[in-house]
Image (cartoon, rainbow, N blue to C red):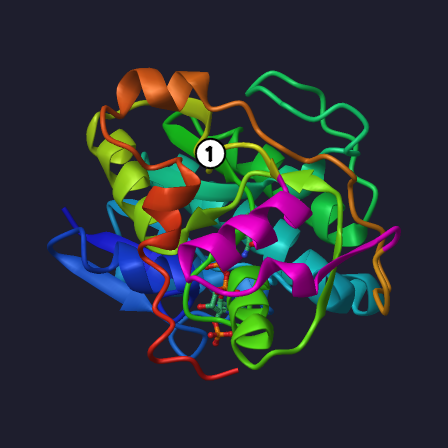
Amino acid sequence: MKVLITGSSGQLGSEMVRLFSDIIPSDRKMINLENPLKVYDDLDRIKPTLIINCAAMTDVDACQTNMEKAYNINSASPLSIARYAIKNNVRVIHFSTDFVFNGEGGNYTEDSIPDPINYYGMSKLMGDMAIEAIPNHLVIRTSGVYGTKKNFPLVVYQRLRDGKDIKVIDSYYSPIHAKNLAKASSDVIKSNLTGRINISGERISRKNFAIQIAEFFKLDPSKILESSEFSGQVARRPKDSSLKIDEARSIIKWDFYSVKSNLSLLDVKNLHL
Ligand SMILES: NC(=O)c1ccc[n+]([C@@H]2O[C@H](COP(=O)([O-])OP(=O)(O)OC[C@H]3O[C@@H](n4cnc5c(N)ncnc54)[C@H](OP(=O)(O)O)[C@@H]3O)[C@@H](O)[C@H]2O)c1
């Protein structure tokens, strides 16, 4: 088996590469998803027998202001991956986002109807659809991935540690640490499941999450202030993009979802914000 893992420098990809043997880690120098036509040729040259696509343009505001780039990376390149996979009978694992939903309902299941309200969600949804046209595929939908990059829990931690206040909006999602996401995903991938599955943390509001971060790291929660709207953001965000994870919990028999399990993996010693 020749396992190609794209996005090997990313939060998820860098964890995934540790969990498989015989892997070809690929970064944008090896396969640049901005050039979908070349992606097909690159795959044809490398000839992987399993593709785990962890690469994406994940900056939600940048996707809104540079739609062509977002389209190429998140929509058209998955289409090239699908074309290669169908021609060569290859299995593809692909990661999707809670931002394919409009956020009016929350608790989205694998069968909920997407209705993106920003271009990141739209471009990812088109990528999901391309991958779902492959006979042997698995789309893993997730939410609020945090790991090494600048992200919500690290910003909350750093500001509270430095005695600064932090404004958080009371919207809901299902955050998960990249290490738990990678391990839970690899369990499901190795079980040969096909179709679509949600793998994320448990549903929580950003305000409550910030409070739990403060409690976990013994910081002062009184500096957490509620804000009624996202400030300084170009793209609209869903108010409740939380995912239901009943199916994943019935397959994965360890705790990948609780706030504690995920926060315990947060590496605050090597903080580079
Ligand atoms: N982060 C979240 O909160 C979140 C939430 C829901 C779903 N997801 C999904 O989960 C998956 C993994 O996300 P993540 O948090 O690991 O993202 P990430 O840390 O931003 O990593 C994205 C990866 O994609 C690579 N990439 C970006 N543009 C590329 C290009 N043109 N060609 C090749 N590679 C390129 C990046 O390479 P560079 O390092 O060179 O930029 C990086 O390795 C994605 O499918 C994402 O949509 C993420």
> Does the beta carbon at disc 1 come under 8 Å from ligand 1?
no
| Residue depicted at 52% across the width and 76% down the height | 161
Residue 50 counted in the magenta span: no
Q: Which sits in the foreground, 215 or 154?
A: 215
Note whether 174 is above or below 156 in the view shown.
above
Note whether 132 is above or below 170 in the view shown.
above
| Residue depicted at 23% across the width and 24% down the height | 253
Residue 227 counted in the magenta span: yes
Range of residues picked out in magenta: 205-229
Q: Position of residue 93 (x, y in %)?
A: 38, 40
Q: Is residue 194 visible?
A: no
Q: Position of residue 97 (x, y in %)?
A: 59, 42
Q: Which sits in the foreground, 221 or 235?
A: 221
Density class for disc 1 (Cα within 10 Å; few <14, some 14-19, many ≥20) is many
Q: Position of residue 139 (x, y in %)?
A: 46, 34
The number of numbered discs placed on residues in the rendered structure image is: 1
**Is 85 on the left-hand or right-hand side of 166?**
left
For mark 1, give the secondary structure.
Answer: strand
Q: Position of residue 192 (x, y in %)?
A: 25, 25
Q: Residue 233 lies in what quarter of the image?
A: bottom right
| Residue depicted at 57% across the width and 29% down the height | 243
Note whether 10 is above or below 247 in the view shown.
below
| Residue depicted at 42% across the width and 70% down the height | 148
Q: Is residue 269 visible?
A: yes
Q: Disc 1 marks which residue?
A: 139
Name the kind of residue labelled 1 in the image. Answer: Val
